Amino acid sequence: MSVLLGIELHGNCIRLQAVDRKGTRLALLEEPVSVPFERWWGTHPDERVRSVRALLQHALQEGHIRPASIAAIGFSCEPSLVLVDAEMEPIPPRALDWQHLDPSDSSPEQVLRNTLARFPSILRGLHSVMDLQDWLRYRWTGAVATSSTFAWHSGLSSHSSPAQRFDPVALQQVGLESGQLPPLMPGPHRVGTLQEDLVTDTGLPRGTWVCAGTSPRAARLWLAAEPTPGQGIVLLEPGGATLWRVGEAPDAGASCEEVIPAPYGDHWYHREAIEVADPERVVRIARDLSNIGIRVCTIAPGLFATPMLMGLPESAREALGASIPFPSRLGDPPEYAALARSIIENPMLNGETIRIDGALRMPPKG
């Protein structure tokens, strides 16, 4: 099984989660930290790097996850700020007098403005401005990049600016030049692959890539197949079915709900269709997907002997079974499976909602 390993740094703990091809989040491990991540100025960035690396190594050594199953690693963390000097080392928070920050006035935007105004010498020797997840990705891959989320939290972009660039006016106001900022990724893009020392220490596959974010939808698209132009991928999601097609870069300002960057190359996934999977729209979904050879059927089940229902008292189960016209009993799971298999094996079944409920009539709502 291939998964996206999500490393989330929120609140007062580090969490490891895996997102599989179905978009399911699998909790693996978590570990508390002494300084909460919302107090990002209270700990040296490399201390966070060491903590995350140690937890990952522990999870792999204890067998919480197999190294070969990890296709990619994504980071997510609280808004934060890391100033990087000309030697590509983080400037220690104490050197910036951040230990005296007032938590009520410690947004990355305000701290950046105040720090650069107070220490002009730092501004002149500043190589880059990042947040913590950017720094983690740099330490793990050697690649420098950031996201539009950081651009907004740092006040260096605005919602009216294209997501692919920083706001020149905002940069001028704090005295920064565009060269002192990492390339701005338009979405959950791949940043780079693991450096050799991490491959050696963890046993992770060489070429494991590190990306921005832990989005289940993006992970499912990335894990589905190699992105090739024109390729269509259908995701079955809680709200219905979504069709995504691999194409070229979108226009500036496109919503992340409509386009998602492929993990590498210049390909993008464009959403072409979305329908709520109710019986009235199954035919429309089937017609939308017919050009790529996909059939769509839905099963409308009645009362089945699921683990939840089997946990009810016997008298309650008998009453539920008696409410079904014929046969007057709960359905057996193998009967549901037999219908699903019939749909798969019969190529002419398409655009159909099939009831399997013994002609059950549900009581009116309200």
Image (spheres, grey):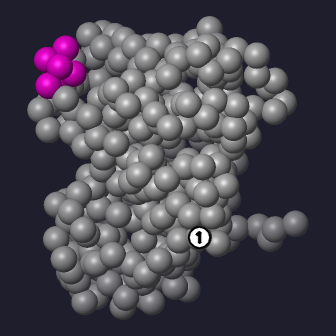
Q: Give the extent of the magenta segment.
A: 196-201
Give coordinates of residue 263: x percent, y percent.
27, 55
Nearest the camera: 169 or 218? Answer: 169
Q: Residue tagged by mark 1?
A: 161
Q: In which quarter of the image is residue 139?
A: top left
- Asked if residue 140 is positioned above or below residue 333 in the image, the reply reads above
Callout 1 secondary element = loop
Give coordinates of residue 251: x percent, y percent.
43, 81
Magenta highlight: main SS: helix
Q: In this view, does 89 lie to the left or right of 193?
A: right
How crowded pointer 1 is (Cα within 10 Å; few <14, some 14-19, many 20+) is rated as some
Tell me the quadrant of the picture where the N terminus can be found. Answer: top left
Q: In this view, does 285 lie to the left or right of 35?
A: left
The residue located at (69%, 38%) in the rendering is: 117
Q: Is residue 344 left or right of residue 212?
A: left
Disc 1 marks a residue whose amino acid type is Ser
Q: In this view, does 144 lie to the left or right of 363?
A: left
Q: Please tell me whether residue 13 belongs to the stretch shown in magenta.
A: no
* Whether residue 150 can be seen here: yes
The residue located at (39%, 24%) in the rendering is: 89
